[in-house]
């Protein structure tokens, strides 16, 4: 019978390889491996949500990137991520609300266009050929990874002022583009919404993250509905959904708390680097390049990534020391 268990020896394609397994020989050899795979997916969901809830992005992009690298078809990967987000975004939104991180006006304006865009994007992706679509979707994810790093580094060290809230003219296009890209690429709501709102300087960073995470629930509903209509329930990998969901739900409350503590730039560079490396690998393999070329390219990119990450960490530490010195100077009494 058809099974999503992998009976081969390839350690990479561990999520969705449809194959005919003999009931006795395959079941015993894959049971333990399949359980380990689900645990790994749960950890992926946990780490991705920890980053997403702290940074306002990267759950969908990170999860979809790893699922594509594992051999999952683009539509199946994005569908699994969106269904898991029904739980993770709900818990994340509630947690952010409790910590006062949500601007409900922004959520209300973003949600509708995001829902429409997600339905359109999921319908489009479901009608694309999976093998042909993989390098294109990886290209979108690669661009998003670069975009995440560039946007956060481009913000500089200046603290923004919040004189006015985002207008509907600004939020509606963000919702449409972000929702569509989120469904097609398996992620994009956060990279488009969070980075654009942060760079606008019209909303506090913690409220940008909280509002984007909260409105993403509606986007997840739209994307899930579109995939369910286009693929049917049999086209959804429910075990992948469950594994990602469990890990994400566990991480969501902690992420809402960590958003006030962790440097956003460090998280952005770390998450963006992982996204870039994984998708470059997928694209190079799709074009049939030999293994040595692939690994040399990845090695060079990894060195650049490590250097950039180390630089950002040093800058953040120096900035933190400077802030402490300023605070200490203010607290020193100057007289009666």
Image: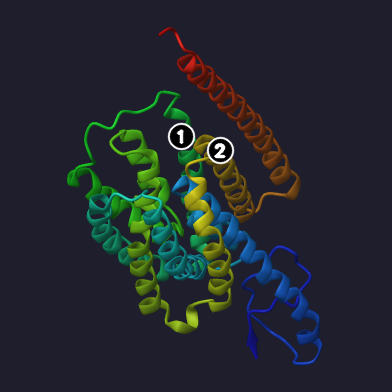
Query: Which residue is rendered at x = 51% and y = 35% of the image?
Result: 265
For label 2, the SS is: helix
Query: Which residue is rendered at x = 38% and y = 65% of the image?
Result: 220
Q: Which mark is residue 269?
A: 2
Q: Residues within 10 Å of mark 1 (few under 14, many from 20)?
A: some
Q: How many marks?
A: 2
The N terminus appears in which quarter of the rendering?
bottom right
Residue 227 in view in this figure: yes
Measure how far apart labels 1 and 2 are at the Cα level.
8 Å
Comparing 103 with 100, the one in front is: 100
Residue 68 in view in this figure: no
Marks 1 and 2 in Cβ contact (< 8 Å)? yes
Comparing 12 with 112, the one in front is: 112
Q: Position of residue 278 (x, y in %)?
A: 61, 50
Q: Residues within 10 Å of mark 2 (few under 14, many from 20)?
A: many
The C terminus appears in which quarter of the rendering?
top left
The residue indicated by pointer 1 is 152
Does 113 sit above or below residue 209? Answer: below
Query: Which residue is rendered at x = 19% and y = 42% of the image?
Result: 167
Does 157 sit above or below residue 4? Answer: above
Considering every residue shown, the one lying at the far top of the view is 335
Q: Position of residue 292 (x, y in %)?
A: 76, 45
Q: Position of residue 181 (x, y in %)?
A: 38, 55
Q: Which mark is residue 169?
A: none
Comparing 248 with 73, the one in front is: 248
């Amino acid at each position: 019978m058809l099974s999503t268990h992998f009976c081969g020896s390839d350690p990479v394609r561990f999520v969705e390889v449809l194959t005919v397994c003999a009931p006795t020989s395959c079941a015993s050899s894959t049971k333990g491996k399949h359980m380990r795979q689900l645990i790994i997916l749960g950890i992926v969901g946990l780490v991705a949500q920890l980053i997403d809830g702290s940074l306002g992005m990267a759950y969908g992009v990170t999860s979809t990137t790893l699922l594509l690298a594992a051999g999952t078809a683009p539509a199946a990967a994005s569908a699994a991520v969106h269904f898991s987000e029904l739980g993770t975004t709900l818990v994340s939104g509630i947690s952010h609300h409790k910590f006062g991180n949500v601007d409900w006006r922004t959520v209300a304006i973003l949600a509708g266009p995001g829902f429409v865009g997600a339905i359109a994007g999921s319908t489009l992706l479901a009608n694309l050929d999976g093998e042909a679509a993989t390098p294109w979707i990886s290209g979108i994810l690669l661009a998003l990874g670069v975009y995440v790093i560039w946007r956060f580094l481009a913000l500089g060290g200046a603290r923004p002022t919040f004189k006015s809230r985002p207008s509907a003219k600004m939020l509606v296009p963000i919702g449409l583009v972000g929702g569509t890209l989120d469904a097609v690429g398996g992620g994009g709501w956060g990279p488009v919404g969070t980075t654009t709102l942060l760079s606008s300087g019209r909303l506090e960073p913690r409220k940008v993250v909280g509002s984007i995470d909260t409105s993403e629930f509606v986007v997840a509903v739209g994307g899930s509905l579109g995939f369910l209509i286009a693929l049917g329930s049999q086209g959804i990998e429910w075990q992948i959904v469950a594994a990602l969901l469990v890990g994400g739900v566990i991480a969501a409350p902690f992420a809402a708390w960590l958003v006030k503590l962790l440097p956003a730039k460090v998280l952005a560079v770390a998450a963006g680097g992982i996204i870039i490396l994984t998708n470059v690998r997928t694209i190079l393999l799709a074009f049939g390049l030999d293994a040595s070329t692939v690994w040399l390219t990845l090695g060079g990119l990894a060195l650049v990534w490590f250097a950039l990450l180390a630089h950002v960490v040093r800058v953040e530490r120096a900035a933190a020391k400077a802030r402490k010195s300023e605070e200490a100077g203010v607290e020193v009494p100057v007289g009666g």
